[in-house]
Amino acid sequence: MGNEKLIHDLIVDYLKQKLSRQYSEIKVNPSGSPDLTLSNHGLVLAAVEVETESSITAEKAQEWNSLAREGSKLILMVPKNSKVKVTELLWKSGFTSNIGVGTYEITVTMP
């Protein structure tokens, strides 16, 4: 579990840096959901929730639905090999509108 927290925090930090060119305000919420709130000129445009393999559950899908209903787009960032599982959860729960699914993977290449 400790490694997943480290990966989660690494992805949140990476996204904050990468998205800083597109959004004037990026707020990180270290103690809850969503992980990132993306705003321009005081208007919240999207929320980002980073998940790890063990945090993807049917209960979490209910939380995603609540976040998506708050008016802005919800972007889920999930491990690449979990995208099918997340998509199935969203379809079974009927929460496909206003939610986008992105993926991440960490690759180490040795000589």
Image (cartoon, rainbow, N blue to C red):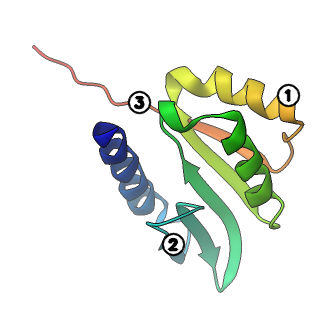
Q: Earlier in the sequence, mark 3 or mark 2?
A: 2
- Within 10 Å of the Cα at label 1, are there few (<14), some (14-19), or many (20+) other Cα atoms? few
Compared across the picture, whether 41 is left or right of 8 comes to: right
Q: Secondary structure at mark 1?
A: helix
Pick whichever of labels 1 and 3 is earlier in the sequence: 1
Q: Quadrant of residue 34?
A: bottom right
Residue for point 60% across, 68% down: 38
Indicate which disc residue 92 carries. 1
Q: What label sits on residue 26 in the rendered view?
A: 2
What's the residue at 63%, 78% (across, down)? 40
- In contact (CB < 8 Å): disc 3 and disc 2: no
Q: Is residue 105 above or below residue 43?
A: above
Q: Secondary structure at mark 3?
A: loop
| Residue farthest left in this picture | 111
Q: Of discs 1 and 3, which sits in the foreground? A: 1
Taking depth in this image into account, of 41 and 4 the one nearest to the observer is 4
Give percent across and percent down for residue 47: 64, 61
Q: Is residue 34 above or below residue 85?
A: below
Q: Which amino acid type corresponds to the residue marked 1 in the rendered image?
A: Lys
Mark 3, residue position: 105
Compared to residue 22, the image places residue 50 above or below, namely: above
Image coordinates for residue 97, horizontal then vertical, percent: 86, 45
Quadrant where the image shows the N terminus? top left
The type of residue carrying mark 3 is Glu
Cα distance in 3D space between marks 1 and 3: 25 Å
